[in-house]
Image (spheres, rainbow, N blue to C red):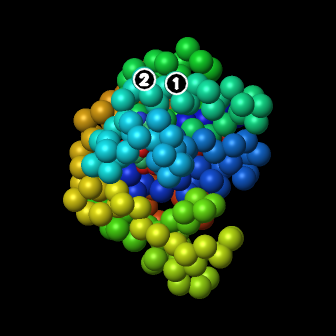
Amino acid sequence: MRLVLLGPPGSGKGTQAARLSAALGVPRISTGDILRRNVAQGTELGKKAKAFMESGKLVPDELVIAMTAERLKEPDAQAGFILDGFPRTIPQADALAKLTALDAVVNLFLEPEELVKRSAGRRVCPKCETVYHIVTNPPRKAGVCDKCGTALVTRPDDREEVVRTRIDTYERQTAPLVRYYKERRLLREVYASGLIDEIALRVQEALKA
Ligand code: AMP
């Protein structure tokens, strides 16, 4: 299965992508995670991407497209993938269409005020990249990753003012992809409010349809 998950920051894309990845046995490819690793390791790509990411803007298309094209060539992506956070612009979607065919695009949608609340409560494991929420998806022991025991952190771009910029960036640059994929008959709309399990069920149903 070759899937794209679309949705604004805080819509639960990463969480649902991880669920789908486990259920379908195909890798979750998060361009945000790959970029954050590059920033942490101080690579050339990381140095170029850092300021864009910290201010809630998009990293330039040519960098992200080249990075994703490389990732999609890896052996584990040959039987399918869940793309989480790519494409985010029309040029990225056009580039993706040249690289591979898609089976479906799931769009997670939610009220704007919910988005800010969700991002503010998000905590991530800097080591294994597992994502938690202090209210809706807390770790067993506060502040510590269930999977690897590392202390959880808040992403620098989850500060409220940066979240608002990210939502605005989404509206301007990424939301046009909803129409793009609707026109190509790939879009499945899923309402992303509720419990993680409920939303996961809605996603499964949408993919069967
Ligand atoms: P995410 O973890 O998906 O929220 O991504 C975090 C940040 O990484 C975004 O706010 C962007 O700065 C950058 N980023 C991730 N994916 C892309 C993409 N497809 N195009 C441009 N920038 C991206």
Q: Where is residue 13 drawn, in percent x and y?
A: 50, 51
Q: Secondary structure at mark 1?
A: helix
Q: Where is residue 202 drawn, in percent x and y?
A: 56, 53
Residue occupying the point 62% across, 27% down:
70
Q: Residue lying at the far top in this picture: please name it.
A: 98
The answer to which quarter of the image holds residue 11 is bottom left
Residue 196 visible: no
Q: Label 2, label 1: how many angstroms apart (C-alpha)?
A: 6 Å
Residue occupying the point 65% across, 76% down:
149
The residue pinned by badge 1 equals 66
Q: Where is residue 145 drawn, in percent x and y?
A: 61, 73
State whether residue 143 is above or below residue 114. Answer: below
Instruction: Name the mark on residue 62.
Output: 2
Q: Quadrant of ligand 1?
A: top left
Q: Secondary structure at mark 2?
A: helix
Confirm or reject: label 2 Cβ below 8 Å from ligand 1.
no
Q: Where is residue 4 drawn, in percent x and y?
A: 55, 36
Q: State which quarter of the image contains the C terminus.
A: top right
- Please, what is the three-letter code of the amino acid marked with disc 1? Ala
Residue placed most toward the observer, 118 or 198? 118
State whether residue 77 is above or below residue 20. Answer: above
| Marks 2,1: beta carbons within 8 A | yes
- Please give left or right for residue 22 compared with residue 93 in the image: right
Residue placed most toward the observer, 146 or 23? 146
Residue occupying the point 69% across, 43% down:
27
Residue placed most toward the observer, 95 or 103? 95
- Please give left or right for residue 83 compared with residue 173 in the image: right
